[in-house]
Image: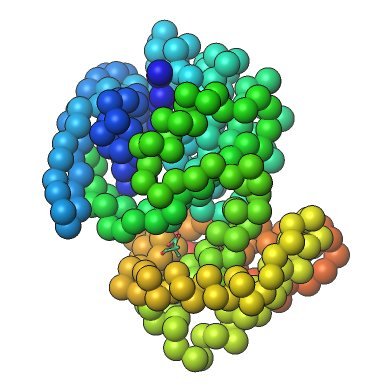
C-alpha cells in the first residue's frame, strides 16, 4: 500500500513511525523549500519507554513525480488553516482512487475541500496523542490518547487501509458518525486551548474554580450551535469530558498555548472562531466564544508586532 503524509510536523512524524512499526513506510510530502525535490532521511522518536529511528523517503509537494500517482491514502496532518491553501494544489496530482484523511484540531476545513475532490473519498479524524518536535527530524511522544476517524464524503476508505490504520495507531477507532466525535473533541479544544493560551498556563490550571464558569459558558454556546447543525450533545457530559482531559493532561501545555508562545499562527478560526461563524449563520450569539476568539487574535497581533 502507498501511504503519504502531508504535514511532517510532530503528529505527522508520529503517525509515520507508528505505520513504520507495522512495516508500512509512508512517503513524507514536504514544502518546496527543500532542494533537491526528493530524498530520504532518518527520523527519530523517543518516549519514556524507548527510542527508535526509521528512514523515510520524502518528496516536495511541487515536484513533478510519478510517485504521486501511486498514492492510495493521503493523511493530512497540516494545521486546519493550512489545509485550504496547501491541499488544493496537491489534489490534482493524486489519482482519483486516492483517499484523503484530514486529521487536525477544529472543524470546517473539509467544506472547502469537498468541492475539489472530483470523486475521491474523504475521511476526517482527530487525535489526542501528544507529540513534540524537538528538531526537524526528532520528536518526543509525550502522551497516549484516543484517535478517531471516519467517512465524510465520496467513496469510503478501503477495508485494508482502515485495518492498517487501526492496527498501527494505538487507541484508534473507526467512527461511522465522525462529525459527532469531532464536535465532542471541538468542545474540549474550545474550552481548554484559548484559556490556557491567554493565561499562559498548563492545562491543569483550568481545574481551578475561577475557570469553571467560563468553561461552562463556552460549552453551553457550543451545544446550542451544534443543535442547530443537527448534532445532539449534552452540556453535563461534555463538562465531565473537558475536566477529565484537564486532569489527564494537567502538566501539558495546549497546542494553542505553544503556538502563541512560539509566535506561530493559532487554530482559533477552526475552533472558537468556527463556532462564532456558525452562530452568525444561524442568527444567534456566542458571546464567550467571540470574546475568547478576539483575545487570542489580539495576543497573536501583539506577538507579531514584537
Ligand atoms: O488537543 C489538545 C490540544 O492541546 O490541542 C488538548 C486535548 C487540549 C490537549 O492539550
Task: Assign the C terminus to one quadrant of the image.
Answer: bottom left
**Number of marks present in the image shown:** 0
* Residue 111 visible in the snapshot: yes
On screen, residue 210 above or below 238: below
- Residue lying at 58% horizontally and 40% vertically, measured from the top left: 150
Q: Residue furthest top?
A: 66
On screen, residue 145 above or below 43: below
Q: Position of residue 264 (x, y in %)?
A: 41, 56
Q: Position of residue 248 (x, y in %)?
A: 38, 71
Q: Position of residue 260 (x, y in %)?
A: 41, 64
Q: Residue furthest bottom?
A: 209
Work out whether residue 277 or residue 233 is closer to the camera in this orientation and state it: 233
In the image, is 294 to the left or to the right of 246?
right
Task: Assign the N terminus to one quadrant of the image.
Answer: top left
In the image, is 305 to the left or to the right of 274?
left
In the image, is 215 to the left or to the right of 147?
right
The quadrant of the picture showing ligand 1 is: bottom left
- Residue lying at 41% horizontally and 60% vertically, measured from the top left: 255
- Residue lying at 24% horizontally and 42% vertically, measured from the top left: 136
* Snapshot colouring: rainbow
Q: Position of residue 143 (x, y in %)?
A: 31, 58
On screen, residue 135 above or below 117: below
- Residue lying at 20% horizontally and 36% vertically, measured from the top left: 43
Work out whether residue 16 or residue 144 is closer to the camera in this orientation and state it: 144
* Residue 288 visible in the snapshot: no
Work out whether residue 51 or residue 293 is closer to the camera in this orientation and state it: 51
Amino acid at each position: 500500500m502507498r501511504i503519504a503524509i502531508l504535514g511532517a510536523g510532530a503528529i505527522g512524524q508520529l503517525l509515520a513511525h507508528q505505520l513504520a512499526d507495522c512495516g508500512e513506510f509512508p512517503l513524507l510530502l514536504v514544502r518546496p523549500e527543500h532542494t533537491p525535490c526528493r530524498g530520504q532521511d532518518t527520523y527519530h522518536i523517543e518516549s519514556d519507554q524507548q527510542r527508535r529511528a526509521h528512514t523515510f523517503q520524502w518528496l516536495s509537494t511541487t515536484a513533478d513525480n510519478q510517485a504521486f500517482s501511486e498514492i492510495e491514502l493521503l493523511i493530512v496532518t497540516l494545521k486546519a488553516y493550512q489545509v485550504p491553501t496547501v491541499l488544493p494544489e496537491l489534489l490534482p496530482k493524486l489519482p482519483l482512487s486516492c483517499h484523503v484523511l484530514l486529521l487536525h484540531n477544529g472543524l470546517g476545513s473539509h467544506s472547502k475541500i469537498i468541492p475539489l475532490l472530483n470523486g475521491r473519498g474523504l475521511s476526517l479524524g482527530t487525535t489526542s496523542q501528544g507529540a513534540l518536535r524537538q528538531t526537524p527530524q526528532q520528536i518526543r511522544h509525550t502522551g497516549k490518547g484516543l484517535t478517531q476517524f471516519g467517512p465524510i464524503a465520496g467513496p469510503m476508505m478501503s477495508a485494508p487501509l482502515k485495518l492498517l490504520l487501526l492496527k498501527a495507531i494505538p487507541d484508534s477507532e473507526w467512527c461511522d458518525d465522525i462529525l459527532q466525535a469531532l464536535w465532542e473533541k471541538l468542545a474540549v479544544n474550545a474550552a481548554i486551548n484559548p484559556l490556557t493560551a491567554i493565561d499562559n498556563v498548563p492545562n491543569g490550571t483550568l481545574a481551578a474554580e475561577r475557570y469553571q464558569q467560563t468553561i461552562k459558558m463556552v460549552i453551553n454556546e457550543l451545544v446550542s450551535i451544534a443543535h442547530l447543525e443537527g448534532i445532539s450533545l449534552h452540556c453535563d457530559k461534555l463538562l465531565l469530558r473537558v475536566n477529565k482531559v484537564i486532569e489527564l493532561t494537567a502538566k501539558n501545555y495546549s497546542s494553542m498555548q505553544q503556538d502563541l508562545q512560539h509566535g506561530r499562527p493559532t487554530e482559533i478560526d477552526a475552533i472558537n472562531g468556527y463556532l462564532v461563524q456558525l452562530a452568525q449563520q444561524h442568527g444567534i450569539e456566542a458571546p464567550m466564544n467571540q470574546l475568547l476568539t478576539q483575545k487570542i487574535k489580539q495576543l497573536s497581533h501583539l506577538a507579531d508586532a514584537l
